[in-house]
Image (cartoon, rainbow, N blue to C red):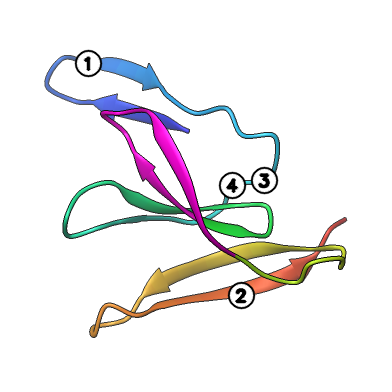
Amino acid sequence: MYKHVHVYKVMDTCIAADSYCSLVVPCRKGGYLVSVGKSICHWDWDARKLTTLATVDEGKETRINDGKCDASGRLWFGKSYRC
């Protein structure tokens, strides 16, 4: 993942995942919810810490495809088969 800081016009590279990352949602209390392969993780940009919160479809050839939060703050996401 990359973060562009507009004020300073710099690009900050922070995480290199070994799997596909397609979902990035900011959290109210800081950090981001991100998908890494089959897992939903919390990414703390300042601490450079990735914490796995949940993993779906153990043993299947799927990945988290895309998602976002609804007005109530619930995270919705879809899955797809790996190509």
**Residue of label 4:** 21
Q: State the residue in front, 45 or 47.
A: 47
Amino acid carrying label 2: it is Gly
**Residue of label 1:** 9
Q: Is residue 72 rendered to the left or right of residue 41? A: left
Check if mark 3's residue and mark 4's residue have beta carbons within 8 Å: yes
Amino acid carrying label 1: it is Lys
- Residue at the spot x=26%, y=29% of the render? 46
Question: First in sequence: mark 2 or mark 3?
Answer: 3
Q: For the residues carrying marks 3 and 1, which lies nearer the camera in this image?
A: 3
How many numbered circles does the render carry?
A: 4
SS under mark 3: loop
SS under mark 2: strand
SS under mark 4: loop
Tell me where residue 72 appears, x and y as whole percent: 24, 85
Check if mark 3's residue and mark 1's residue have beta carbons within 8 Å: no
Q: CA distance from mark 3 to mark 1?
A: 26 Å
Question: First in sequence: mark 2 or mark 4?
Answer: 4
- Specify the label residue 19 is tagged with: none
**Residue of label 3:** 20
Mark 2 crowdedness (10 Å alpha carbons): few <14, some 14-19, many ≥20: few
Tell me where residue 24 appears, x and y as whole percent: 42, 53
Q: Name the image quarter holding the C terminus.
A: bottom right
Above-or-below relation of 35 to 14: below
Q: State the residue in front, 7 or 59.
A: 59
Q: Is residue 1 rendered to the left or right of residue 18? A: left
- Specify the label residue 78 is tagged with: 2
Q: CA distance from mark 2 to mark 3?
A: 14 Å
Above-or-below relation of 4 to 35: above
- Residue at the spot x=75%, y=69% of the render? 80
Q: CA distance from mark 1 to mark 2?
A: 34 Å
Check if mark 2's residue and mark 3's residue have beta carbons within 8 Å: no
